[in-house]
Image: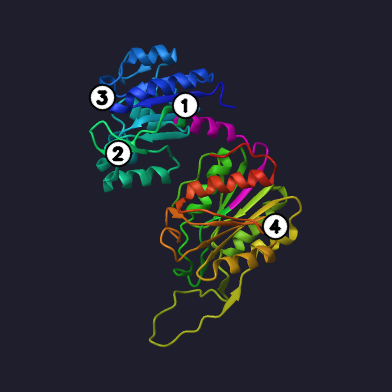
Amino acid sequence: MFAGKKVLVGISGGIAAYKVAEVVSRLRKLNVEVHVAMTKSATEFITPLTLRSLSANPVYVDLFDEPKLWNVEHIALAEYVDAVVVAPATANIMAKMSTGLADDFLSTVLLATRAPIFLAPAMNHAMYHHPATQENLTRLRERGIKIIGPAVGFQACGTEGEGRMSEAAEIVERLDQFFSGSDCLKGKRALVTAGGTQEPLDPVRFLGNRSSGRMGYAIAQVLQESGAETILVSAPTDLPTPPGVTRVPVQTALEMYEAVLANFPKMDVVVKAAAVADYRPAALAEQKLKKDGTNRTIELVPNPDILAELGQQKTSQVLIGFAAETENLLANAQEKMLRKNVNLLVANDVTKPGAGFGSITNIVSFLFPDGRRIDFPQMSKLEVARNLVSEIANLLGRNKGVK
């Protein structure tokens, strides 16, 4: 529930700062405990006194002010709140967040907090579309930061375009939806596989694939945020483990098979998002294979089909599979869904721009055994994950909305 939650509203220096008074007011009416931190630039657009009156709490501006409630105040506040929303989120504050710069109270709290962060960007449309701003947004999304807007419309500079801050009602609704759905899987246990397995050929080489692991890591993050106790069985990747998720590192398909099967009986949900090698070398060379100018034949043997094994063993578990195809997407995915006995299959054509391995976005379809199909446009992998977890909650009869 949203009532009783503690939210830090961060205000950076943009003309849209005047709208934040309504954000604070709406949050208070929902019985949310509101704290406000402002940059010095933000105080040129709206006074701390206004926000103090609306929030009924001290307003933080200077990192070196006399402490109001805590000794190390920026750290204590970062740990105290349940969520942070920055509105307006200027290009400057997003650049600071992207690079880890912390030179004032707000940016320091943003670096120290482990609470979910929401950004409501607001700036001139040319600034918004500048490559540097877009790169910063991409990096922030990859870290799990949630972006609200921006909207398209008339701007204070007299131009019109994308970059207008979302309205207060939309910002508060997004926060409300997040907290309403944040416990929809509470008490459930989930397992996710991610990344591309590696099959050793010799001490220095392996057979692998181009999977980055981003999709599986996003799903694990959203499952954890939704209250599920989440295990992530991960092939090698440089991605950080999502907060609260238990990571089980593996390298090969056989290692993943053993880790998944060992945990499967205790799970309520299993999402097989990893790109698992279908074959492995029949023999591992003890020394590095040397180039001698002749053709070399490598015998491959099949790896176990983890998803098919789970489909045969499952009792009450919700089992989700992925089908990364390069041709005949729907026909191949439909056949795989029925053969593997899954509750839902996520299909994507990895040859499409914005949907392949390594991309931060995806273009997917959800297929169900009853013939239903949901097609999605290109969206971030985190957004795909939120849609998928919402469907998982539906399958478990627990859906309150996952955002």
Where residue 379 is drawn, which disc sits there?
none
For disc 2, the marked residue is 95
Q: Mark 3 points at which residue?
A: 41
The crowding category of the residue bearing disc 1, from other C-alpha atoms within 10 Å (few below 14, some 14 to 19, many at least 20), is some
Q: Residue furthest right?
A: 315
x 69%, y 44%: residue = 396
Mark 2 or mark 1: whose residue is earlier in sequence: 1
Report the front residue among 3 and 201.
3
Q: Which amino acid does label 1 sit on?
A: Glu
Using the rendered view, name the quadrant where residue 137 is placed: top left
Q: What is the CA distance from the residue labelled 2 to the residue labelled 1?
A: 23 Å
Check residue 65 for magenta coloring: no
Q: What element carries label 4?
A: loop
- Image: magenta residue range: 171-192
Identify the residue at horizontal 40%, vertical 11% (top origin).
53
Asked if residue 173 is among those painted magenta in the image, a careful observer would answer: yes
- Where does the N terminus fall, quadrant-wise? top right
Q: Say which element carries label 2.
A: helix
The percent coordinates of residue 303 (x first, y second) are: 61, 69
Q: Which residue lies furthest to the left in this view?
A: 157
Question: How far across and down, in percent of the image, does residue 352 sit?
Answer: 44, 63
**Residue matched to label 1:** 79
**Disc 1/disc 3 C-alpha distance (Å):** 25 Å
Pair 2/3: label in front: 3
Distance between mark 4 and mark 1 Cα atoms: 45 Å
Reply above or below: 313 against 79: below
- N-term-proximal mark, 4 vs 1: 1
What is the secondary structure assignment of the residue under circle 3? loop
**For the residues carrying marks 4 and 1, which lies nearer the camera in this image?**
4
**Looking at the image, which residue is at 45% across and 54% down?**
378
Q: Give the mark nearer the N terminus: 2 vs 3.
A: 3
Instruction: In the rendered structure, find residue 370 and report the number of the disc placed on it.
Output: 4
